[in-house]
Image: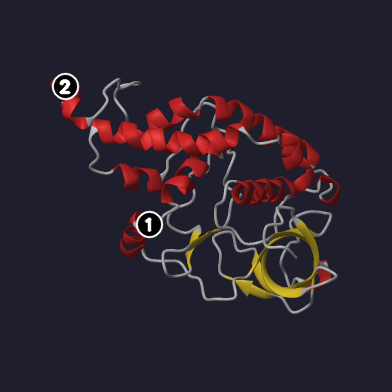
Amino acid sequence: MPVNDFHIQVATAHPGAEKKPSPKGRTLRTDISTGQDRLVAHIKLLSIEDIAKEAICAVLAKIVHLPILQAYYVNIDSTNLEDCSPGNIHNIAFGLQEDNLPAFRLASQQLNIELINWPESLRCAVFDQWIANGDRYPHNLLFAGNRHFWLIDHDGAFPSYVSPTAPVKSDILALLATNKSEFELYELRKKSMKYVEQYQSIDWNEIYELLLPTQLPGGSKYFKKYIQFLKIRTDDMQGILTQALGIRQKELELANPNQITKETQK
């Protein structure tokens, strides 16, 4: 399978799944087969709606160059789940390929240090605002060493209580904004909007095809719902980021920090 293949893949789980600790208690580690390859994956037993969330976020993360492992729709045999609910009547789970190298969660203090030095920290924070995901930090990043993280777990994206134009809590964005002057926050927003330009150029028909909607029964209505949400949200990202960064002025017309007025410095 090509590394740059953005499609969700389809796989079948092998018997002998191992339960993994997780907040919702429904994550398994098991071998899966795609017909060509056999590999190890972590699969989540979710509703069709939550699988659709995971799938669209996985595809979009790849499209905007964020580090996420290959995603799968995994067919499972419910008789092999050992007291676990399959999550939906279609016996389909969501899977992410396991990294060949060890990856693990960091304690908050060490995580902050690594995130400050992670080249993709702002890209990740802007992405989370875009998908309205306030559940990234600290548990849904796996540290793989040498300034590298993997993104995991997006079933908290697109919460029903968040409107398309409202910001969400982002601890990574807050970390990057800590102790910044008003001018520095403005510059951070300006840099963030470079990532938003990627969102504006997305071909949503292509995204829909990459999600293989025919392979996820009932998933199509959720994909269309989330795509509509993102279309609206993309147009208002500057306002969302202004609020999320705590910028007091909507616009700073100053060319450099030496021109900051006393009012700006308050």
Residue where numbered disc 1 is placed: 115
Query: Observer-nearest residue: 88 or 150?
Result: 150
Among the two numbered marks 2 and 1 on one chain, the one whose residue lies closer to the N terminus:
1
Q: Which residue is drawn at 52% across and 35% down?
A: 196
Where 67 sits versus 82, above or below?
above
Where 260 sits versus 47, above or below?
above
Q: Nearer the viewer, mark 2 or mark 1?
A: 2
Q: Distance between the residues labelled 2 and 1?
A: 32 Å
* Image location (x, y in percent) of residue 263: 17, 20
* Lateral position of residue 249 relative to residue 127, left or right: left
Q: What type is the residue that disc 1 sits on?
A: Leu
Where 27 sits versus 54, above or below?
below
* Image location (x, y in percent) of residue 244: 39, 34
Q: Which residue is drawn at 79% across and 77% down?
A: 15
* Image location (x, y in percent) of residue 204: 71, 35
**Can see residue 143?**
yes
Q: Residue at x 86, y 47 (%)?
A: 214
- Answer few, some or many: residues within 10 Å of disc 2's Cα (few below 14, many 20 plus, some between 14 and 19): few
Quadrant housing the N terminus? bottom right
Q: What number is the disc on residue 261?
A: 2
* Image location (x, y in percent) of residue 44: 67, 61
Q: What number is the disc on residue 10?
A: none
